[in-house]
Image (tube, rainbow, N blue to C red):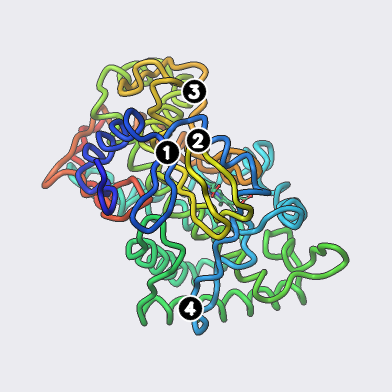
Amino acid sequence: TALQQPPTTVDGGRRLLSWLTTMRRDQPIWRDDTGSVHVFRHREVAAVLSDPATFSSDVSQAAPDDVPNFVEGSLAATDPPRHRKLRRIVSEAFTPKTVAELQPRIVELTTELLDEVAGRAEWDFVETLSNPLPVTVIAELLGIPVADQPKFRRWAEAAITATNEAQVGEAEFHINDWVAEQLREMQDYLLSHAKRRLDDPTGDLMTRLVTAEVDGEKLTDNELFSFAADLLFAGHITTTMLLGNSVVAAHENPEALAEIRADRSRVPMFIEEVLRTRPPITLTNRLVRQGTRIGEFDVREGGMVVAWLLSGNHDEEKFSEPEVFDLHRDPNPHLAFGHGIHFCIGAPLGRLETRIALNLLLDRYQGWGPAGEGPVFHDAGGLFGVSQLRLATTPA
Ligand code: HEM
C-alpha cells in the first residue's frame, strides 16, 4: 500500500477510493516518503482541523518571490487570532440569509447560460454552465464590471493550472511563466479595482475590503489582493466541480434522481450526499507549529500533515455503508467544506448555486446521460471533479 504518490481521481476516483479504504484499514495514520503525515479517519481529520494552535494553515512561505503571493494574507492561510478578525470583515456577505438574496440573480444567470444550448441534444456541461456560473457570481459579488469578466475566467484557469501542477503534501508552488503573468495581471487589476472602490464606494465586497480595519489598520495591498484572489480561487473551481459531480451522481444513481425529480425538497439532501461521496477538495494541508503526536507518530515542528477529507467522508466508523449513495443519509457529517474555524465561508453560496442549477436542469430535461467519451476528470492531487462533461439530454 505504500505508494510514492496517492492516485489522482483521473479515473473517476475508483483507484483513490480503494487506496483510501486500504489505508484506513491498515495505516490510518501514515508517514510518506517526504515525511508528511497523512490522516485518513474522520476522527483524526476533524481533530487536526479543530486544533489550529498545533496545526497551522499558514502554508504560504514556500511561494516563489517574483510571483504575487496569493496565499499569504488570505483567509484560508491565516491563523488565529488574526483569522477571526479577517473573517469577520466578509462573514456578513456570506450568511445563508444574505446569500439567499442572490437567488433571483443566480436563477437569471443560470437560465441565460442554459438558454445558449436550448434545443441541442448534446452539449458540454462544464463549458456551458458549471465553469461560467460560479466565476460570474463571484465577479459580481466583488463588483467586477461584466466587460472584465472574461479576464477573471482566464485568471481562474491559471489558478487551476497551478493547482494541477502541485504535488500532494508539498507546500511549494510550481508556477510556470504563463501562470505567473496571469497572477501579476490579476494583482494589478484587483488593486486598481480596489482604488476605484476607495474613491467610489458601493455595497459590494471589494468596498467592504477596502474600508475594513483590523486592529485599527486597513488591509495591506497584498492582503486585499489575496482576499479577492482567495474568493475567486476558493469559490470558483470548487463550485464548478460540485456542479459537475452532482450531474454525474444523478445519472449514476437513477433511483435517487427519480426521487428528487418527484420531490424537489430532497434536492438539498442529494447535494449533501454528492459532497460526501465526491467532495471537490479531497484533502487539506496543515503545517505543524508545535511538535506533537498523532497516534504513534511523532510529528515534528515544521512538518506537514495531510488531512484527507475524502477519506473521512468514507470512514466506515462514521458512516454506515459509506460506499452507498444514500439520498436519505441523516445526519450527514461530511467534511467536504472542512471543519473548525476555516469551515468554508462560501458553503451557503456553493449549495445555493448547485440547488438552482439542479432544479433548472430537472425543469428542462426529462433525462441526461454522458455523451461522447463521457466525463473527463481532473488529473490533480487534491481535486475531485470533471473538467469536461458532454451530456446527451432529452427535453422535458
Ligand atoms: C474554505 C471547500 C465553495 C470560499 C474551504 C475549505 C474547504 C472548502 C474544504 C476549508 C479549507 C481548509 O480548511 O484548509 C469548498 C467546496 C465548495 C466551496 C467543496 C463547493 C461549493 C466556496 C465558495 C466560496 C468559498 C463559493 C466563496 C465565494 C472559501 C474561503 C475559505 C474556504 C474564503 C477560507 C475560509 C477560512 O479560512 O476561514 N472551502 N468551498 N468556497 N472557502 Fe470554500
First in sequence, mark 1 or 3: give its number: 1
Q: Which residue is mark 3?
A: 332
Q: Amino acid at mark 1?
A: Ile
Q: Which residue is mark 4?
A: 64
Residue 380 at x, y percent in the picture: 31, 55
Q: Amino acid at mark 4?
A: Pro
Would you identify the image quadrant in which residue 166 lies? Answer: bottom left
First in sequence, mark 1 or 4: give its number: 1
Q: Which residue is mark 1?
A: 29
Residue 58 vertical position relative to residue 328 in the rendered view, above or below: below
Q: Are marks 1 and 4 in contact (CB under 8 Å)?
A: no
In the image shown, does 188 or 104 lie closer to the viewer? 188
First in sequence, mark 2 or 3: give its number: 2
* Secondary structure of the residue carrying numbered label 3: loop
Residue 221 vertical position relative to residue 83 in the rendered view, above or below: below
Camera-side mark, 1 or 2: 2
